[in-house]
């Protein structure tokens, strides 16, 4: 099974890699166009709010409730029942999200007031940031319909993933990046406020993603006419699973929005610095953590439906080890290369070297929590696949409350960097609670061989960090080089770090090739 999971993970990671590369290209272009000032803050906030709801209605809570149920219905081999289930889910979810979208467009001034309260207070008092509030309310009217399109896209993607057709859903986000890049290059330069052109890019990106998946869904025979099915027994089960999952998935998103709320009171550029550092963090998180979580949830759901507890535990163990193998060196590399990466990627146009330096501080703080973020992605499916959403929700709420407390403590001391520190600490708390409950319930136990494997990865990552820090030129030299020289040196540093890490793994006795073989769960052979 681990070989099949690895193959599926490679497919998703490859498509996600392309999406992340396009995403970084998009961010480079947006940074060049807007920099890290007030207008950039407004666009990023107007884009963040519908994305927050996307995580709830689309690939977040919905996927966690829908995929286990879809796997169960699909396991029954009743095609007519499967089509009816999909039709009623599509009709019910689509109607609800359409209503939410309409309310969001109409109530955009209220949303802007809630999530950018600092700007709203300036608006009431004719302060310097009053125009930010007005622009936010306007741009939300444009970006909010993205929620409707991307929710239907996520529904289609969840169906395709359950049928082991991972590539289409993983590739789809590329189209959003293409739409925003096109808007930045061809529409924004012709507008008095370039950020509005980017907002239209978000709108078009959502529409294009939805249209793109329709032919692939038709090939599966599950492109059906939506039906309202609120009281359908299977839809009701999804609804009951989804409601608590909304709270669970929303925890991290509420934390991010709470960070934005506090950042609107901090120095100009705080939201942008946090955004660009978060974007670099999202690259390994999406490439490895989310990719592995994408393939593990349907697999665990099938294991649970078949009552195969040995494979369930074995696949959990595989996902944890794979996340550690990829996440620990990625986090280490981000910490060491934070400022050079931000300089190379974003320092041009309106984005200054000072912006890169400021964003690097929050990137380092975020990177300390990268492994926790990734482990949450693979441990939570251990609950969702068994249709237990209450437990991760409860732990998520505890983590959210802790994050709010950490925010108050660390933001007072360290400003926007304190917000990133608080997010990482709350993620550590969350993953600790998740593992503790899985362990106590007998669902998954991290055996001594797995712990030894993780320790060896940590040692190899430290060796990599030491050598990389020793060889890395000072930042003052990076600023004197041309863009081509910067890219070349950074690429060489990343490639060299990867080679050093792999060699160090073998020196300390780790055997990552064991992850590619089909081995029994929780045995000493798994190293």
Image: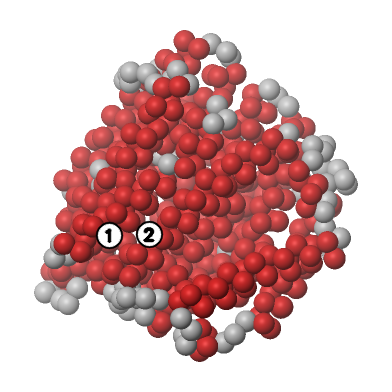
Q: Secondary structure at mark 1?
A: helix
In the image shown, does 492 or 360 lie closer to the viewer?
492
Please name whichever residue, 387 or 452, is drawn nearer the observer in this view of the structure.
Answer: 452
Disc 2 target residue: 26
**Is 298 situated above or below 327?**
above
The picture places residue 408, in percent across and down from the top left corner, at 43, 71
How many numbered discs?
Answer: 2
Work out whether mark 2 precedes mark 1 in sequence or the reverse, and give the earlier one: 2
Residue ID at (19%, 73%): 129
Q: Is residue 6 above or below residue 131?
A: above
* Residue depicted at x 40% and y 43%: 56
Q: Which residue is mark 1?
A: 184
The residue lying toward the viewer, choosing from 367 and 62, is: 367
- Up/down of 448 relative to 236, above or below: below
The percent position of residue 12, horizontal first and vertical second, equals 56, 43
Q: Position of residue 450 (x, y in %)?
A: 79, 52
Instruction: Report the colour scheme.
Output: secondary structure
Note whether residue 380 is visible.
no
- Can you tell which quarter of the image residue 127 is in? bottom left
Indicate left or right for 381 with 363 as reference.
right
Q: Do tag 2 and tag 1 residues touch (Cβ < 8 Å)?
A: yes
Residue at screen point 43% across, 26% down = 217
As helix, strand or loop, the secondary structure at mark 2 comes to: helix
Q: Residues within 10 Å of mark 2 (few under 14, many from 20)?
A: many
273 with respect to 523 (left or right): left
Q: CA distance from mark 2 to mark 1?
A: 8 Å
Question: Looking at the image, which residue is at 29% across and 54% down?
Answer: 182
Regarding residue 94, the answer to whether it shows in the image is yes
Relative to 40, is 372 above or below? Answer: above
Percent of width and height locating residue 319: 68, 45
């Amino acid at each position: 099974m681990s070989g099949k999971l690895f193959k599926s993970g490679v497919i998703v990671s490859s498509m996600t890699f392309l999406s992340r590369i396009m995403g970084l290209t998009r961010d480079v272009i947006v940074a060049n166009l807007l920099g890290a000032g007030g207008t950039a803050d407004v666009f990023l906030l107007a884009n963040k709010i519908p994305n927050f709801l996307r995580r709830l209605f689309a690939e977040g809570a919905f996927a966690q409730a829908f995929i286990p149920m879809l796997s169960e219905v699909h396991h029954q081999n009743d095609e007519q029942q499967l089509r009816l289930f999909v039709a009623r889910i599509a009709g019910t979810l689509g109607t609800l999200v359409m209503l939410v979208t309409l309310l969001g467009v109409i109530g955009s001034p209220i949303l802007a007031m809630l999530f950018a309260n600092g700007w709203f207070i300036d608006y009431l008092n004719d302060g310097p940031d009053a125009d930010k509030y007005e622009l936010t309310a306007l741009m939300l009217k444009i970006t909010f319909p993205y929620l409707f399109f991307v929710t239907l896209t996520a529904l289609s993607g969840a169906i395709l993933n359950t049928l082991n057709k991972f590539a289409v859903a993983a590739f789809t986000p590329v189209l959003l990046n293409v739409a925003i890049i096109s808007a930045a290059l061809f529409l924004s330069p012709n507008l008095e406020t370039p950020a509005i052109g980017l907002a239209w890019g978000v709108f078009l990106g959502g529409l294009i993603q939805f249209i793109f998946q329709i032919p692939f869904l038709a090939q599966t025979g599950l492109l059906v006419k939506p039906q309202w099915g609120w009281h359908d027994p299977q839809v009701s089960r999804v609804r009951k699973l989804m409601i608590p999952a909304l709270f669970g998935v929303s925890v991290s998103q509420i934390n991010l929005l709470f960070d934005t709320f506090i950042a609107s009171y901090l120095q100009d550029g705080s939201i942008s610095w946090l955004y660009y550092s978060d974007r670099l963090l999202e690259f390994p998180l999406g490439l490895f953590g989310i990719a592995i979580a994408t393939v593990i949830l349907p697999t665990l759901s099938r294991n649970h439906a078949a009552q195969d507890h040995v494979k369930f535990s074995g696949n959990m163990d595989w996902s944890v080890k794979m996340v550690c193998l990829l996440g620990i060196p990625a986090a280490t590399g981000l910490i060491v290369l934070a400022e050079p990466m931000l300089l190379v990627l974003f320092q041009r146009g309106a984005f200054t070297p000072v912006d890169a330096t400021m964003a690097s501080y929050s990137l380092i703080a975020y990177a300390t929590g990268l492994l926790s973020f990734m482990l949450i992605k693979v441990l939570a499916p251990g609950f969702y696949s068994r249709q237990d959403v209450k437990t991760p929700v409860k732990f998520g709420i505890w983590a959210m409350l802790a994050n709010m407390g950490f925010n108050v403590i660390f933001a007072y001391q360290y400003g926007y960097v304190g917000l990133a520190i608080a997010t990482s600490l709350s993620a550590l708390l969350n993953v600790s609670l998740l593992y503790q409950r899985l362990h106590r319930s007998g669902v998954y136990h991290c055996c001594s061989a797995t712990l030894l494997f993780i320790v060896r990865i940590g040692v190899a990552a430290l060796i990599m960090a030491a050598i990389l820090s020793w060889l890395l030129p000072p930042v003052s030299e990076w600023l004197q080089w041309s863009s081509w020289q910067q890219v070349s040196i950074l690429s060489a540093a990343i490639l060299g770090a990867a080679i050093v890490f792999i060699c160090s793994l073998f020196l300390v006795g780790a055997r990552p090739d064991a992850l590619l073989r089909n081995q029994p769960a929780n045995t000493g052979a798994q190293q």
